[in-house]
């Protein structure tokens, strides 16, 4: 029976992070009290002529960022075929340094809805399943690199968030190009951003909001096929999140 239970937990936890991406609260939490917003990030001067200019301003915006909330949509396809993609929506809460809380609100796997994940940096992720597994319960702590909470191509939980996006586009050896730039958004393509993570990835396109210089979308390609896409909506910056939001048990 224990063997069957362990198989079930693997099935339920596998790819929970696909509804993740850039922490939330519904399962076992009180209403979060938010402080007045302070969005000075929008005052950063925009003078973007090169992709390096855009990434520098992304870095500057990240430096000014204290916390944020948003709705994140992820589509993950190992083959790049849209018909095979696993998709999901999450409420997401982030606070420096690298405190994250994710509530899965919608998923192509209905069992994942209502699942809660919390990460405070380091090597562990806390998970509360929406529905308990017989014998094993509903609360688990997994290694951040555990494949059960990674993508179908093996991208780990801690390689999907805002901090990781910025680090990938800033690392040595990456070739950047400016895809487009207008009053609404800036798109930067990076070749080599996934070196050491997924050797088959050919490029990554990051779309930044022209006002905040923070990501609206991150799309990862193998040749011309999208294998991972993270989109962010309803972004609220510097709302004053409390530390206890990121401890779930």
Image (tube, grey):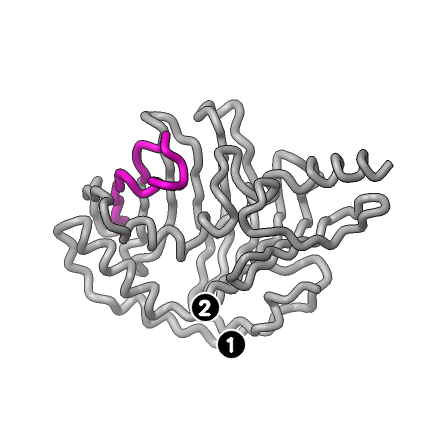
Q: Which residue shows up at 50% across the image and 74% down it?
A: 240
Mark 2 Cα-neighbour bin, 10 Å: few <14, some 14–19, many ≥20: some
- Label total for image: 2
User: How far separated are the C-alphas under marks 2 and 1?
Assistant: 16 Å
Q: Which residue: 44% across, 58% down?
A: 235
Q: Does residue 18 show up? A: yes
Work out whether 108 lies above or below 249.
Answer: above
Residue farthest to the left, as pictured: 49
Q: Is residue 93 visible?
A: no
Tell me the quadrant of the picture where the C terminus can be found: bottom right
What are the residue bounds of the magenta stretch? 184-204
Q: Is residue 183 left or right of residue 34?
A: left
Q: Nearer the viewer, residue 125 or 69?
A: 125
Q: Residue furthest bottom?
A: 35
Left or right position of 162 against 142: left
Q: Would residue 106 appear left or right of 211 to someone viewing this image? A: right
**5 falls in the magenta region:** no
Q: Quadrant of residue 226?
A: top left
Residue 189 picture location, percent across and down: 26, 41
Q: Which residue is mark 2?
A: 96
SS state under label 2: loop
Q: Position of residue 91 (x, y in %)?
A: 56, 54
Q: Which residue is mark 1?
A: 35
């Amino acid at each position: 029976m224990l063997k069957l239970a362990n198989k079930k937990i693997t099935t339920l936890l596998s790819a929970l992070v696909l509804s993740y991406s850039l922490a939330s609260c519904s399962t076992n939490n009180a209403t979060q009290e938010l402080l007045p917003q302070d969005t000075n990030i929008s005052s950063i001067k925009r003078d973007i002529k090169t992709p390096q200019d855009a990434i520098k301003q992304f870095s500057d915006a990240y430096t000014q960022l204290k916390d944020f909330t948003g709705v994140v949509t992820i589509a993950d396809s190992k083959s790049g075929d849209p018909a095979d993609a696993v998709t999901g929506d999450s409420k997401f809460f982030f606070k420096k340094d690298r405190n994250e809380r994710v509530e899965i609100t919608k998923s192509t796997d209905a069992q994942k809805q209502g699942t809660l994940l919390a990460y405070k940096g380091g090597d562990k992720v806390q998970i509360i399943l929406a529905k308990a597994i017989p014998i094993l319960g509903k609360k688990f702590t997994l290694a951040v690199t555990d494949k059960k909470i990674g993508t179908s191509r093996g991208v780990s939980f801690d390689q999907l968030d805002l901090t990781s996006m910025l680090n990938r586009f800033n690392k040595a050896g990456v070739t950047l190009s400016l895809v487009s730039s207008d009053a609404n958004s800036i798109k930067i393509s990076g070749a080599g951003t996934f070196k050491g993570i997924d050797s088959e990835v050919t490029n990554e396109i990051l779309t930044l909001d022209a006002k905040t210089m923070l990501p609206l979308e991150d799309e990862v390609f193998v040749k011309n096929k999208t294998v991972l896409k993270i989109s962010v909506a309803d972004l609220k910056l510097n709302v004053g999140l409390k530390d206890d939001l990121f401890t779930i048990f």
